[in-house]
Amino acid sequence: MKLKDKIVIITGASSGIGKSLATEFAKRGANLVLGARQFVTLCELAQSLEKEYGIKAVAVQCDVTHEKDCDHLIKQTLVTFGKIDVLINNAGIAMRALFIDTDVKVLKDVMDVNFWGTVYCTKYALPEILKTKGTIVGVSSIAGYKGLPGRTGYSASKFAMNGFLDALRVENLKTGVNIITACPGFTASNIRNTALDQSGKQQGESTMHEEKMMTSDEVAKIIADGVENRARTIIMTGQGKLTVFLSKILPGLLDKLVYNTIAKEKNSLLK
């Protein structure tokens, strides 16, 4: 799939990986529908991309935890462009707290964004993507293959997303629709700054060494390449590929390696 003149919807597009995805797809000539809660920021991004790359970009205020917002996002795309070629379910939120200390509502809130947001947008977009034999992308995580301590809700949401996309892929084996599960490793973005603590408040400061991580721009380029090549599953970083491999053959060893890695965080939750 060449992306020039394709219609691409990106959720969570106002910052982080979503913003980088918008820029990368605009560079390749795609017309964009950008969804996020931060409407003013989204409008500024859409305008700058139109000016710089000569594409058309539409900003739609959308909270993916609200099913009606997701329905509106898809309807607005059809009103503006008349079709959908690619849906990128990128909107996401993280959490950081030990389960024993965490209000259960935090897990529900994370699941609402990461899992149900993907389900809602995909539900309304799928009939249109069937017409174009297009692509649905879920921006998941290595945490969807291996549970991470202090991220029970986040890992659960990404495991759920992976299962949903996997089943959807098999359902559409003969329809021409491509389903991509994209799994970045640790990425330098604002997701850790906005991660929820045990009470549901944003932690505000990353506890990890961001300078050693892949950038959101690198993630966006890999995903855009995956859409063009109609990839199936994209596991990013050597650490991510090793994690998935070890989860299948040496799960006990992986438990220890993951524990030791997370224990090295600033202000580690693991004592």
Image: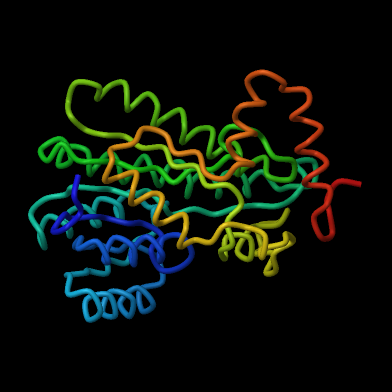
Q: Residue furthest front?
A: 238
* Percent of width and height locating residue 210: 66, 63
Q: Residue furthest right?
A: 271
In this rendering, the answer to whether 247 lies above or below 76 is: above
- Please, which colouring scheme is shown? rainbow
Quarter of the rendering containing residue 191: bottom right
In this rendering, the answer to whether 221 lies above or below 211 is: above
In this rendering, the answer to whether 182 lies above or below 65 is: above
* Count of picture labels: 0
* Percent of width and height locating residue 160: 50, 33
Q: Is residue 16 left or right of residue 136?
A: right
Q: Is residue 258 left or right of residue 144?
A: right
Looking at the image, which is closer to me, 165 or 79? 165
What residue sits 34% from the left and 61% below the top?
A: 62
* Percent of width and height locating residue 88: 33, 49
What residue sits 32% from the left and 27% below the top?
A: 169
What residue sits 16% from the left and 49% below the top?
A: 84
Looking at the image, which is closer to me, 168 or 234? 234
Looking at the image, which is closer to me, 106 or 170? 170
What residue sits 61% from the left and 27% below the top?
A: 245
* Percent of width and height locating residue 98: 77, 45
Quarter of the rendering containing residue 127: top left
Quarter of the N terminus within the rendering: top left
